[in-house]
Structure formats: C-alpha cells, structure tokens
Image (cartoon, helix red, strand yellow):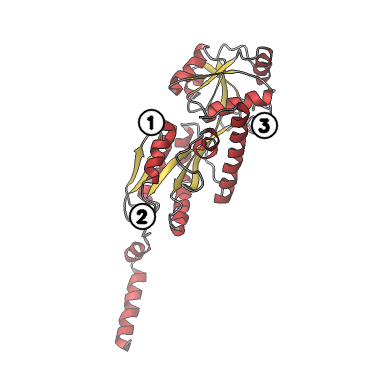
Amino acid sequence: MSLLNRRHAVLALGAFAANPVLHSQAAKPTWPSKPVRIINPFPVGGGPDGTARIVGEKLARMWNQAVVIENRPGGNGFIAIDAFKRGAQDGTDMVLLDNVHLAAYPHLFRKLPYDPVRDFLVLAPLFRTFFFVCVPNHSPYRSMADLIADAQARPGQLNYGSWSIGNAVHLGSLQLAALTHTRMEHIVFKETGQLYQSVANGDLDFALGSSGTAGPLARAGKLRFLAVMAPQRLQGFEDIPTVAESGGPAQAIVTGWNALAVSPHTPSSTVTQLRRDLTTALREPDIQPKFQTFGYEHYFPTAAEFQQFIRAESRRFGTVIAAADIQL
C-alpha cells in the first residue's frame, strides 16, 4: 500500500470512529435480516398470548425487524409445533412451548408427533406461575388439612376440574391425590372461565388455578384461595399459606411455565444472541408489572439450570402419569 493510500485509510478509520452514526450502523447486529415469527399454540387473548406479544414488541424494537405472533391453537399444541418443524431453521422461526409439551406429553401420549430433545433447542422461559387451591367462597374447608381429611373420609366423592387430560392443573391435582392417598373425581371443562365459575357456584369442590385465571373471581369474593402449591408464600399473596403450612404435604408444588424454542440447527452465535436479547427484554422495568396482571413472575435460570429444571419436571410428571395409569 502506498503512503498516500495508507493516509487515506487512516483518515477513513478516524472518520468512522468519530462518526457515531457510522459506528452504530456498523455495530448493528446482522441477525435477524428478515422478520421473525413466534408460532403460538395458544389462542389470541389470555396470559401466554399476552406475554408473547409483550416480548415480541420488545424484540422488534431491539432488532428493528417485525416480530409476528402467529397463533395456531388446537390439537394440544401439535398444530403449532408441526408448523414450527416445517419452518425456518435459522432462528427466525420460534415456537412458544407450554411446560406440558416438554415435561408431561412425552409420558402421556403413545405417539407424540415431535421429539422434545431432537426437535427443539429451548432458549429460555418467559415466565413461571404457581397454582392456588381454589374453593368456593362458602366452602367448609378452612385449610388443606380439612380438604384432605374429607377426601380421605369419602373416597371418590370429592371432585375437581381442569380443561383437559394431562394439563398442569390436572396433573397437579393427581399429584395432590397421590401424596395424600386419596381418590377424587376429575371433571373436564371446555373453557377455563367455565371451570372456575363452577368452583364459585359450588359445583366443584376445588380446582387449581393461578392468580391470572382464578384471580378475578377471588377478587370478586366468589371463590377463595385455600393455599398455594409453592415452596413459599407468593409476593402479593402473603396472607395465603403454602400447602405445607395449611396441613398438606410439602411436596405438593405445581408450577406452570412457557418457554421459547428454536430449531436445533440454529447457528450457535444466533442462539447466544437470542438468549441475551430475551434476557434484556424480560429485564426491562415495565415488563414485570405487565406480567403480574396475568399472575406471572420472572424466572431467570441459566441455560444449564433450565435444562436441569425441565428434566426434574419431566421426572415428576412421569411419576404422576405412571401412577395414575393415563395414556392417550
């Protein structure tokens, strides 16, 4: 290179360093270079869809790219998962997964249309929530000890509800029955609103519910939170005891959570960026108040910690499903 060319090169570098616009443009991430899609197995409205849209808006501003939430509800989430498996494998197609997709369904279904290990690279959880034991406001149960004693005295007479076979509320209720050596009847409802209204009406003895799903009726004084199936009392619900504090088994802990996943073929650099950007978005100060409206809390495990958690959840659900002898 001639002396003159070297001088031009130095001047060009100096201009680049001195110009923040040029610097920011060059530093802008090269991924994603096209719109990103989050395939959502949940219907429009409700907590999981709402959180996906909140996070999608944050990522869209961060990347200066459109982030499209594509709702494909139905079929236990298999419709959305099939669309994801046929989608892009560079990280621009993500799928929102419920905890049962990764931890329960592999034990529940004889033929599962996906492999939870080979088909997904799980990025991070968006949230987690714990479930309350909900009873009618006029229920005679004042503690978990009361409910358990009645269930033991009248095998098969108490009933509880959920919206399907094998969801976290159903499996959590089965876990409670197994831990307390009781037998109770499961009633399936088409909609969550109908489920919790039936608790309020006294048609059900109890149901597990989150502050997002059952909270409106609790605040209206139509049902009560008897206890929370968590290791400790929840922020904002300090007056609600844990199951253990209320006379039940300490092992009765039930969580709900959603996570985002990409194809295992996604480049490692993209996976690293996605995890970093998701954490940045979820830690923005306006996010937590929005999530709290759904009864969700932040959960920030490392990738290794989250994989360990998923394996533990899978073992727990597998034990409950095997003990109840359920298969679909």
For the image, the number of numbered tags is: 3
Is tag 1's residue or tag 3's residue first in the polypeptide sequence? 1
Q: Which residue is mark 1?
A: 45
Residue bearing the label numbered 3: 251
Q: Amino acid at mark 3?
A: Gln
Per the image, the residue denoted by label 2 is: 32
- The residue shown at (32%, 63%) is 21
Is residue 104 found left or right of 293 in the rendered image?
right
Q: Which is more N-terminal, label 1 or label 2?
A: 2
The percent coordinates of residue 238 (x first, y second) are: 61, 28
Kindly identify the amino acid type of the residue bearing the numbered disc 2: Pro
Q: Nearer the viewer, residue 105 or 253?
A: 105
Dot 1 and dot 3 residues touching (CB under 8 Å):
no
Discs 1/3, front:
3
Instruction: Give the residue type that dot 1 points to.
Output: Gly
Q: Foreground: 50 or 194? A: 194
Does residue 195 lie above or below 72 as drawn? above
Mark 2–mark 3 contact, CB under 8 Å? no
C-alpha separation, residue under disc 1 versus residue under disc 3: 33 Å
- Count residues near mark 2 (Cα–Cα under 10 Å), then give few for <14, some for 14-19, many for 20+: some
Residue found at the very far bottom of the displayed protein: 2
Residue drawn 39% across the image and 31% down it: 74
- Label disc, if present, on residue 183 of the rendered structure: none
Distance of label 2 from label 1 (alpha carbons):
27 Å
Q: Residues within 10 Å of mark 3 (few under 14, many from 20)?
A: some
Q: Position of residue 40 (x, y in %)?
A: 39, 38
> At which x and y percent is residue 57?
37, 44
**Location of the N terminus (image quadrant):** bottom left
Numbered disc 2: secondary structure: loop
